[in-house]
Amino acid sequence: MTEKPFNLSAFLPYRLAVLSERISRRIAADYERTHGLTVAEWRVLVHLLRSGEVSVREIQTCVNLDKPRVSRAVARLEKAGLVRKVPGAADARLVAISLTGKGHGALADILPAAESVEARLLQSLSADEYENFCAVMEKLHGVLDADPQARPRSPMDTEGLGE
């Protein structure tokens, strides 16, 4: 009896990763062209928009990037004047990062294009299809939430999902 050959193209984790990467790269094409930002820099900026002043560790936990990549992104964003770093109030060894006015302005330029890509994707789905898609994603998250070997979700990843 021969085993069925492994088909990477049909492997769910691979299919999800490819779709996610394609969407991310499509959105990145706009902010790279208009503002010279990388994916990591975009994620840091958007996280700061929703979180306010936070540490590199808090950003890293919420944007699904390793700490060195977040640190490099923050350094580049600070050099570009889009974020500021200040000593933490409770512990001066820790650094708190926040958006500058220029950072808010860059996001005001960038977000409409990102939302337009999202809208085009969502227009391809009926309301029921989107609702089912979200339910399936939550089921898959639930499996991973119960798996002690899986990286936990950030609480921010579930914000606004029950609306």
Image (cartoon, rainbow, N blue to C red):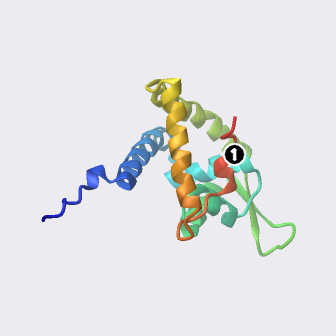
Locate residue 67: give its quadrant.
Answer: bottom right
Q: Which residue is mark 1?
A: 159
Q: Residue furthest left?
A: 1
Q: Quadrant of the C terminus?
A: top right
* Above or below, 18 relative to 79: above
Q: Within 10 Å of the Cα at label 1, are there few (<14), some (14-19), or many (20+) other Cα atoms? A: few
x and y, in percent, of residue 147 in the image: 55, 65
Q: Taking the image as drawn, is residue 81 in sight?
A: no
Q: Can see residue 129?
A: yes
Q: Residue furthest bottom?
A: 93
The residue at the point 40 percent across, 52 percent down is: 17
Q: Secondary structure at mark 1?
A: loop
Residue lying furthest right = 90
Q: Quadrant of the N terminus?
A: bottom left
Say whether residue 58 is left or right of residue 139. Answer: right
The percent coordinates of residue 14 (x first, y second) are 35, 54
Residue at position x 55%, y 53% in the image = 141
